Image (tube, grey):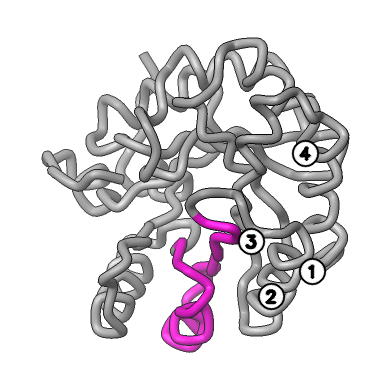
C-alpha cells in the first residue's frame, strides 16, 4: 500500500466547491484552506474564478474552473467562451464536461470536436481536464471518451462531476489510466472523502483528486461531503 504524508497528498488535491448555493464567503474559506494546506488548486464555478484568483495571489495554489458544468450540454462555442473568460480571470486549469448524450449515441466526431474547441480556446494558457461522467457510461464508452479526449488535445481525463450517478471508483480510474498515454493525467472525483479512498485512487493511477473533503483527507479524519 502506498504511504503518503498529508503534505504529499495535498499536492494531488483540487479543493472543490461547486454547490449552487456557494457564497463569496464560502469561496474565501475554500481558498484559505487551500493556502494553509497547500493543495494543488481550488476548483470553482467560473463566476468565482476572479475572487479565488485574487484570494490565492502569492500562495502558489492554482485556480481551476469548471465549464459546461454539470450537464455538458451547452453549445461547444459557449463552453469555449466560458473557458477563455475563466482563463482571462485567472484560471490555470479548465475542467470541461463532455457532451454525454452525444457520447452515448456514438457521435464520436462531435464529442472530439466539442473537447477540441475548449482546448483550442485556452491553448498555451491553461490545461484542460475532460469530465466523462462515468456513472452514465459502460466500459467501452469510458475507453472511447479517454481516447477522444487525448485526440482532442486534453491534458487530463476525469471521472465525474459529483452531480451525476455514482462517483469515482478504483476500477474506473484503472480503466482510464489504461486508455490514455502516460503523458495524460487521470483525475478521480466524486466520493473521495477520506485518506484510504484517496490513497486507493492514487494506487489505481489517479494523478489528481477532486474533492471538497481535502482538509479531512490530509488530516486523516472523516468528512460527509458529497463531492
Q: Earlier in the sequence, mark 2 or mark 3?
A: 2
Across and down, in percent, residue 192 comes to 31, 36
Task: Reply yes or no: does residue 150 show up in magenta.
Answer: no
Q: Which residue is mark 4?
A: 111
Callout 4: 10 Å neighbours few (<14), some, many (20+)? many
Q: Earlier in the sequence, mark 3 or mark 4?
A: 3
Q: CA distance from mark 3 to mark 4?
A: 20 Å
Q: CA distance from mark 2 to mark 1?
A: 7 Å
Q: Earlier in the sequence, mark 1 or mark 3?
A: 3
Q: Residue at x 52, y 49 (%)?
A: 71
Q: Which residue is mark 2?
A: 87
- Nearer the camera: disc 1 or disc 4: 4
The magenta stretch is 43-69
Secondary structure found at label 3: strand
Q: Describe residue 94's horizontal placement relative to residue 200 as left or right.
A: right
- Nearer the camera: disc 2 or disc 4: 4
* Viewer-proximal residue among 204 and 162: 162
Secondary structure found at label 1: loop
Callout 3: 10 Å neighbours few (<14), some, many (20+)? many
Q: Which residue is mark 1?
A: 125
In the rendered image, the quadrant that contains the N terminus is top left
In the rendered image, the quadrant that contains the C terminus is top left
Amino acid at each position: 500500500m502506498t504511504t503518503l504524508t498529508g503534505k504529499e497528498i495535498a499536492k494531488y488535491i483540487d479543493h472543490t466547491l461547486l454547490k449552487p448555493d456557494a457564497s463569496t464567503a464560502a469561496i474565501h474559506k475554500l481558498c484559505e484552506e487551500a493556502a494553509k494546506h497547500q493543495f494543488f488548486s481550488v476548483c470553482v464555478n467560473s463566476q468565482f474564478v476572479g475572487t479565488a484568483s485574487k484570494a490565492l495571489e502569492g500562495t502558489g495554489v492554482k485556480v481551476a474552473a469548471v465549464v459546461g458544468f454539470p450537464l455538458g450540454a451547452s453549445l461547444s462555442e459557449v463552453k469555449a467562451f466560458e473557458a477563455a473568460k475563466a482563463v482571462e480571470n485567472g484560471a490555470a486549469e479548465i475542467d470541461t464536461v463532455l457532451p454525454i448524450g452525444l457520447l452515448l449515441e456514438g457521435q464520436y466526431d462531435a464529442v472530439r470536436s466539442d473537447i477540441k474547441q475548449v482546448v483550442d480556446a485556452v491553448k498555451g494558457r491553461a490545461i484542460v481536464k475532460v469530465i466523462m461522467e462515468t456513472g452514465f457510461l459502460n466500459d467501452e464508452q469510458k475507453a472511447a471518451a479517454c481516447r477522444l479526449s487525448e485526440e482532442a488535445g486534453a491534458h487530463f481525463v476525469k471521472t465525474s462531476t459529483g452531480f451525476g450517478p455514482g462517483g469515482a471508483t478504483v476500477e474506473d480510474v484503472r480503466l482510464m489510466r489504461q486508455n490514455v498515454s502516460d503523458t495524460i493525467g487521470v483525475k478521480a472525483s466524486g466520493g473521495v472523502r477520506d485518506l484510504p479512498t484517496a490513497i486507493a485512487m492514487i494506487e489505481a493511477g489517479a494523478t489528481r483528486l477532486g474533492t471538497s473533503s481535502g482538509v479531512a483527507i490530509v488530516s486523516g479524519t472523516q468528512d460527509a461531503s458529497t463531492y
